[in-house]
Image (spheres, helix red, strand yellow):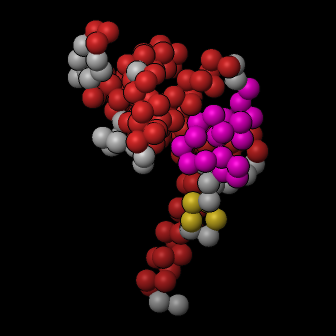
């Protein structure tokens, strides 16, 4: 076996080990929470009339942190893995970045309010914290009607640093 093949095998093993280690997901969550706190310092409060774009980035980071914690919980409580043969497998019956679905898969019992917050944070992860638009205008319209600021304010009051 040549040296490159051995290196590839090691890197695949390391990837799989990290992907199935709850502590690795917990450490990522801690880093994301620190990043959300750093961004929070730059957010400008526009009052009731608007939302600073960095507040959406902060919500995205909070959502990603929660996602990492939930994935660590999923691994720990189910004994399942998120990786196999060097590929991310995801969680069965849970959509990408769908925090409520990931929480269900992890066995996290939540209130109606907690589920609503997780669902709202999912929107920030999927597009609002990183892109100017979603994948279609109807999704944008639904969030605009609810008001980004009120969604973030409610979510932030429940989970924010």
The outermost residue toward the top is 47
Residue 105 falls in image quadrant: top right
Do we see residue 4 in this rendering? Answer: yes
Note whether 109 is above or below 3 in the view shown.
above
Q: Which residues are magenta?
A: 91-109
Is 16 left, or right, of 78 in this rendering?
A: left
> Is the C terminus in the top left, top right, bottom left or bottom right quadrant?
top left
Q: Position of residue 159 (x, y in %)?
A: 51, 20
Q: Give how far across and how far down residue 68 sits, in percent.
A: 54, 40
Position in image of residue 2 (x %, y %)? 47, 89
Q: Does the magenta segment cover residue 95?
A: yes
At 34% from the left edge and 32% from the top edge, which residue is drawn?
57
**73 vs 17: above or below:** above
Taking the image as shown, residue 83 lies to the left or right of residue 5, namely right
Residue 82 percent location from the top left of the image:
63, 54
Q: Which residue: 42% across, 48% down?
A: 135
Instruction: Say which of 136 and 48 sits in front.
Output: 136
Of 2 and 35, the residue lying toward us: 35
């Amino acid at each position: 076996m040549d040296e490159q093949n051995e290196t590839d095998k090691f890197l695949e093993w390391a990837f799989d080990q990290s992907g199935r280690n709850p502590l690795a997901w917990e450490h990522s969550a801690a880093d994301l929470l620190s990043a959300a706190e750093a961004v929070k310092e730059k957010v400008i409060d526009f009052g009731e009339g608007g939302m600073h774009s960095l507040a959406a980035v902060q919500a995205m980071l909070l959502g990603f942190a929660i996602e990492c914690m939930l994935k660590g919980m999923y691994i720990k409580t189910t004994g399942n893995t998120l990786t196999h043969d060097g590929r991310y497998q995801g969680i069965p019956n849970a959509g990408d970045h769908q925090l409520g679905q990931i929480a269900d898969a992890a066995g996290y019992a939540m209130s109606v309010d907690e589920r609503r917050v997780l669902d709202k944070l999912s929107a920030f992860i999927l597009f609002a914290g990183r892109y100017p638009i979603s994948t279609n205008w109807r999704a944008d319209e639904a969030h605009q009607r609810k008001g980004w600021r009120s969604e973030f304010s409610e979510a932030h009051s429940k989970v924010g640093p």
